[in-house]
Image (cartoon, grey):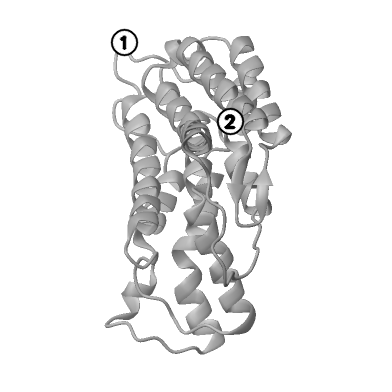
Amino acid sequence: MFRALAVLAAAAPQLLSIFMLESCGWFAYEVMEPGPLEIAVWRTAGYASLLLPLVLAFLALWTPRRFRTVGTIFAAVTLALNALTLVVPYTTPCGRKSGEWLVVACHAVAVVALLRTRPGQQVPRPRAAVWSAVVLLVLGRALVRNHSSDGAVGCWADLQGTWAQTMIHLDTAEALYIWVCLAAVGAVLATHRSAPFVGLVLLVPGLFQPIAWVVSDATHGCSSTFELFAWPYLIAGALALLSQARLPGRGDPGATPERDER
């Protein structure tokens, strides 16, 4: 239970970030920019918040007996870095803003939950490999999207109205690494029966465009309809759904028996 609480609390800041976005419109004058200290504090805190669910995911998959110790240290560092954003405001076009108490509270909950977590059982290596692939596929897609020259990946259908708005929200979730954090949550819960449901969630960005294209009778300029599929999400979702299948080596002599983390 505490393991699930820890990873959910660690991922919560990214999952909730889509509700914290703000827009100030366009400016015809030069806006104030953040100073070096502000950039250093806020970027470091942001990277730590993003990395924490990933660190917990790979610890749970490959070194579960170090999950508590290493996870607590990393979560405590992340908590301290985000606490600094409360006292070092960041300058934006909308004005100066301080860090969110909710983010700091989430990391504090993660630290407490990690301290209460008991050492877990070793995840069977085939299953650990499957969930590692899920996380890396989703992470790779998000990195390509955020570091591409035009901020877009693949080919988009010419959607209109509600379909277009929904696609924009899904793309924003990708830019905020929300799908990555969901994959990390699934990886930490790899031995639990609920883990494959993460695969259903990952299929949403993977299949949305081709389904919306068919249902809305939209057009597209892609060289092939297959380009409408977000293949990393599609493959990751399928792997997550199949992760509870009986895998080779599960019954091998000397293998560590599985146990659901409740």
Q: Residue at x 56, y 59 (%)?
A: 31
Q: Which is more toward the observer, 49 or 220?
A: 49
How far from the left and from the top, in percent, is residue 88?
62, 32
Residue matched to label 1: 254
Q: Position of residue 168 (x, y in %)?
A: 55, 69
Q: Quadrant of the image for the N terminus? A: top right
Answer above or below: position of 205 versus 42: below
Q: Residue furthest front?
A: 29
Q: What residue appears at the point 63 percent right and 37 percent down from the top-left corner?
A: 89
The residue wearing badge 2 is 10
**Vertical arrangement, residue 135 with respect to residue 37, above or below:** below
Q: Nearer the viewer, mark 2 or mark 1?
A: 2
Residue at 36% across, 75% down? 155
- In percent of the image, x 66 and y 57: which residue is there? 22
Give the amino acid type for the residue marked by disc 1 in the picture: Gly
Residue 162 at x, y percent in the picture: 64, 78
Classify mark 1: residues with Cα within 10 Å, few (<14), some (14-19) or many (20+). few
148 left or right of 98 in image: left
> Mark 2: which amino acid?
Ala
Q: Residue furthest left?
A: 223
**Residue 4 visible from this viewpoint:** no
